[in-house]
Image (tube, rainbow, N blue to C red):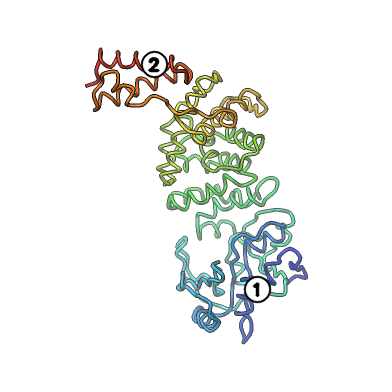
Amino acid sequence: MSDVRLLDHAPWLTSGGTARVLQLLNGNGEEARVVGGAVRNALLKLPPGDIDIATTALPDEVMRRARSAGIKAVPTGIDHGTVTLVIDGRPYEVTTLREDTETFGRKARVAFGRDWVRDAERRDFTMNGLSVDAEGVVHDHVGGLDDAAARRVRFIGDPDQRIAEDYLRVLRFFRIHAAFGAGEPDREGYLACIRGRAGLASLSAERVRMEMLKLLVAHGAGPASAAMVEGGLLQPLAGGVAYTGPLATMIAIERELALAPDAIRRLAALTVAVTEDARRVAARLRLSNAEAKALDSMGHRWWRFANKDEANARRLLYRLGAERYRDRVLLAWARSGGGDVASARWRELAELPQRWSPPKFPLKAADFIARGLAEGPALGHVLTLAEDAWLAADFPLEAAALATIADQAAARANRDPKP
């Protein structure tokens, strides 16, 4: 128990859905508290994120009380004691206090209990082992208050044991440190992660993807990724070389341009030098189709921006669209060497979509039918030839220039028809 109170930094405790759930589950011999990340975030004066609630009440009692109060209750993980209550469209996970009796990574056998200390001791990091009651009193059974104040991410109890219970905690150690830590990672925890790195191979690609993408957008993503590389933890996940220098430069570029952190863009800087890298990483992390396509686009001949020629840049912007163009420029900038984030020329290329919008290709099929071409595959071929010539001429819109391009494309198609 501590005398630290959170009411000033956690208004969600006394109003809205959280207050309603706590009121519902407190009393008649039962107690409920908010646990984990929301408590940590309140201490650090950050938005609460997901609000998780622990209770001494068994799942059936949680369901009964919810039904009596007209609250929707969903048994989302009832075997492990979790019921989700939905209030005003927002879900609140409520989990009965528990202790592990046997662990198989994520598949642990648990026993329900009433001991808040034992429940806190089974969690991963001390700053995540805090709880707060409806009165705003913070309960600290694992030293989390001091670690939160120092922004020190430290395993609860024996780090090797915590990691063996779930090897995803290796990645969570670096992700939580990147988001909430300061300075170097806790030495004891870092060495335990290195000792347990072989266990990463047992994790599903989906779980690894989730943690890696969260890590990459955290404030301390650069130093945390560098620490992982030094410990031999990142290369196996990427299936190749990890480039911490370009990642650091990409992060600096995003800040220079006031861009929101982008996980896939940062993943490209960290892992992609050629298109084959993008495809391998997408497969290893089971990226979504949209994520895989974005990564592949960034890795495709990004080095063509090395000469910083704006005419070529305009053509690429036309072909790629503004978002894909910008991300490929940023990867080329991050990989240009020297970490120069103040380069006026690179900035001009990156901001080209803000200064110039590509015109639509003005020639139509009718222009070539009028020149004697019949409808069919050959017509599509001549349109492609004409569009290429129009781009090479730097997007002319004058009638005379367009007529010349159309005449030349039609003549070429007639002379050398595509099979």
Q: Looking at the rendering, in which quadrant would you find the N terminus?
A: bottom right
User: Distance from label 2 to label 1 (Cα)?
Assistant: 72 Å
Residue corresponding to mark 2? 403
Give the amino acid type for the residue marked by disc 2 in the picture. Ala
Task: Check residue 19 in the rendering and tell me which mark sits there, or answer none.
Answer: 1
Comparing 237 with 102, the one in front is 237
Please provide percent x and percent y for residue 86: 53, 71
Element assignment for label 2: helix
Taking 256 as reference, is 60 above or below it?
A: below
Please provide percent x and percent y for residue 118: 60, 72
The 10 Å Cα crowd at callout 2, few under 14, some 14 to 19, many 20 or more, is few
Please provide percent x and percent y for residue 75: 46, 73
Taking 154 as reference, is 246 above or below it?
A: above
Comparing 155 with 69, the one in front is 69
Give the amino acid type for the residue marked by disc 1 in the picture. Ala
Lateral position of residue 127 relative to residue 202, left or right: right
Comparing 226 with 386, the one in front is 386
Task: Check residue 180 in the rendering and tell me which mark sits there, or answer none.
Answer: none
Q: State the residue at coordinates (46%, 38%).
A: 294
Please provide percent x and percent y for residue 300: 44, 29
